[in-house]
Image: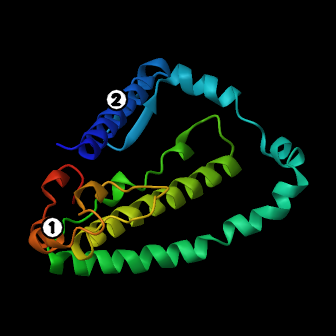
Amino acid sequence: MDKLEKLIEDIKALEQELLTELQKKQDEYLYIIKGRKVRFDEETRRYHRTLTTKLRTYIAEASLLHVVTAPFIWICIFPALLLDATVSIYHSICFRVYKIPLVKRSNYIVIDRHALSYLNVIEKINCVYCGYFIGLIDYVQEISARTEQYWCPIKHARKLNNIHRRYHKFVEYGAGAEYRESFESIRGDFSDLKDDSD
């Protein structure tokens, strides 16, 4: 294992450790997860309702700049829905043809914050929007990463700001002989995706 592969393994281990620590918060904040539902006990829900900012107070205290810029945030829903539909159709058809494991949408698009009792209706709607939009970007990135692995598994020469989960399988930039020798095996190497695919 070379240094780059070791660093990637270390990052994966740290990501898993982070997830484990985040999940420990369930005990601290008194909720349990049953299937796709998050449940608080009744006493905690009552306490949360006391923390809700009343709608008229929330609106009255809103910054004028927030009110003026809100339509620019919300108009992005239209290209997001178009992107979602387009990529989902591509994913559903082409991944089956290429025999690439399907991406499990629910692992990326998580909408659950709207169920928090301490949020008012505007905050809940905003949380649904953010959960959808950010999840959609992650979902599209994973579909793109698997597509890139299938069609063009070559690392870039220049530094990337964000390296996706499939990148470590790619051949080094300029390693032409290795690319020709390993292309078919790389494009079919999705054995590590058992827990993430539909």
Tell me the SS state at disc 2. Answer: helix
Between residues 184 and 33, which one lies in front from this camera angle? 184
Mark 2 to mark 1: distance in Å? 34 Å
Residue 164 position within the rendered picture, expressed as x and y whole percent measured from the top left: 37, 56
Instruction: Pick the residue in front: 163 or 77.
Output: 163
Q: Which amino acid does label 2 sit on?
A: Glu
- Residue 9, picture quadrant: top left
Badge 1 marks a residue whose secondary structure is helix
Q: Which mark is residue 178?
A: 1
Against 77, residue 2 (above or below) is above
- The location of residue 62, given as percent across then percent down, is 85, 48
Q: How crowded is mark 2: few (under 14 residues within 10 Å), some or many (20 or more)?
A: few
Three-letter code, disc 1: Glu
Q: Residue at x 62, y 22 (%)?
A: 47
Residue for point 51% across, 57% down = 134
Which residue lies at the image location 39% right of the left edge and 65% below the top edge? 157
Quadrant of image for the N terminus = top left
Q: Is residue 90 above or below residue 39?
A: below
Q: How crowded is mark 1: few (under 14 residues within 10 Å), some or many (20 or more)?
A: few
Residue of label 2: 17
Q: Looking at the image, tell me whether mark 2 or mark 1 is earlier in sequence order.
A: 2
In the rendered structure, the answer to whether residue 27 lies left or right of residue 52 reads left
